[in-house]
Image (spheres, rainbow, N blue to C red):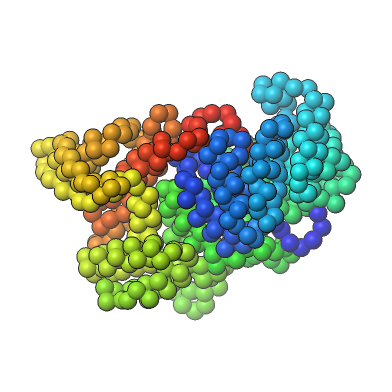
Amino acid sequence: MAGDQVKIFDTTLRDGEQAPGCSMTLREKLRVAKALADLQVDIIEAGFPAASPGDFDAVQAIAEENRGPIICGLARCNPEDIQKVHDAVKGAEKHRIHVFVATSAIHREHKLKMAKEEIIRSAVGAVKMARELCDDVEFSPEDASRTELAYLADVVTAAIEAGATTVNIPDTVGYTVPAEFDRLFHYLCDKVPGIDDITLSVHCHDDLGMAVANSLAAVAAGARQIECTINGIGERAGNCSLEEVVMALKTRAEFFDLATGVDSTRLYPTSRLVSGITGMHVPRNKAIVGENAFAHEAGIHQHGMLQHHSTYEIMRPDDVGISRSNLVLGKHSGRHAFRDRVRELGFDLDEFEINRAFQEFKKLADMKKDMYDGDIEALIMNVDSASGGPWIMQSLHFESGTQEDASATIVLLDESGKAQTVAATASGPVEASFSALEQATGVSLELRNFELRSATAGDDAQGEATVTVEYQGQSYRGQGTSIDIVEAASRAYLEVINRILRRRERRGDPAPVASDINRASI
């Protein structure tokens, strides 16, 4: 437990993906895992292999492709789950098995219907089996923050004696507050034999808006691993935000006297990647990575900033990978300049992806007067989402006017390159476009939410559209970008349709989020 280094355990691909609509394809998970490795997190919790064959395959692929971070999988306290985690992560250079069981009175009575002694036996058996398969074993008492302290100490003691090398204390429902959590960690440090020989971890949810504060309180009280997600995504109100705890420890190093191994200059690019893949916009006022995090509009603030940045900035934009550049490229910029800028923005594209993105960049540069970093980011996300097929939108034409129905005609290309043209009418152009897409693809969706925002400044800025839809009881999000907002909305809708069709084609994909196993949470 001792030491001046705090391990960062990223669970974006496991707990973060459980946020409604945030499910990712295998290709998307591999991209996020690569970004997390570049960010230099210590542990990547790649998923819950027992949830489905699809989850198992994703964890296994991440384990085999990534070298650097420890690759971890989650398991309930039963032999089948534990064996599946081992089989999925064993291909990694370094791997971990993470087992959990609920311990609070409310969970014991209403969910598990197990006595205290049964739960301890279950935990001990699971940890021992995991240790036979792997030297690195983490144990979590689910809902620890609502568990009786004396009983929690008994469970943790038993887990350490059974061979757990990391013990994680979760605030599963975001219920605790910093002072209370501080007392809990000090209690465990005082009462649990052998706790100084293991890594003590913390995992907080944000239901009361205190996930970061509670995590930092735990660190101050002795925790040396923080479990968190990019942009704080996760179930309900989300998880502890990785970028916030990392920068809190870095910015207030004189207070905490602790450090992480994270490359903070990769925080903003990783945030944008996860936002683009999940369709979960980062709020403008989000700490660290929000658009307003380093913006100063008040006159007195601007005056102070001109004198010295530290008057109102406790961090520099480049500390977290935010570029201060304004106009970056134009229509006469070459492929090499474009590739260099893409890399500076934190995107790792292969040659095929670079070529496609560059083609779209040239088209956009002919239509827009000014090009910004945000334009390039949005363009790359758009190209990446469109590359998954099976349908590609070749063209869109719509007509609308006041007091008359709108019409939309869409031309889609299937995987063989064959074109299909469909027309539809509705009360507005967006609705007509959505209707045409449904007719062409045979996928009928129920629209739950539609959001539109500007990707950059100016009256010719690209619009980023995000749609949240429901299909067969599961929520999906899609994102599309264009200087035409109807086209942006249509691209977002088509992205969701493509994701559903790809999932149909793959055998053993995860069941709807509503299932108990896929919503396992610590």
Q: Residue at x 31, y 76 (%)?
A: 333
Q: Position of residue 493 (x, y in %)?
A: 31, 43
Residue 398 placement, left or right of 231: left
Q: Residue at x 10, y 37 (%)?
A: 404
Residue 353 placement, left or right of 186: left
Q: Is residue 222 visible?
A: yes
User: In the displayed structure, would residue 136 be above or below residue 259?
Assistant: above
Q: Residue at x 43, y 60 (%)?
A: 291
Q: Nearer the viewer, residue 325 or 261?
A: 261
Q: Position of residue 95 (x, y in %)?
A: 69, 51
Q: Nearer the viewer, residue 431 or 209?
A: 431
The quarter of the image holding the C terminus is top right
The quarter of the image holding the N terminus is bottom right
Q: Position of residue 193 (x, y in %)?
A: 89, 44
Residue 486 placement, left or right of 281: left
Q: How many tags in the picture?
A: 0
User: In the displayed structure, would residue 347 be above or below residue 327?
Assistant: above
Q: Please, which residue is most extreme toward the bottom here?
A: 307
Q: Position of residue 334 (x, y in %)?
A: 32, 76
User: In the displayed structure, would residue 92 be above or below residue 308?
Assistant: above
Q: Residue at x 23, y 47 (%)?
A: 418
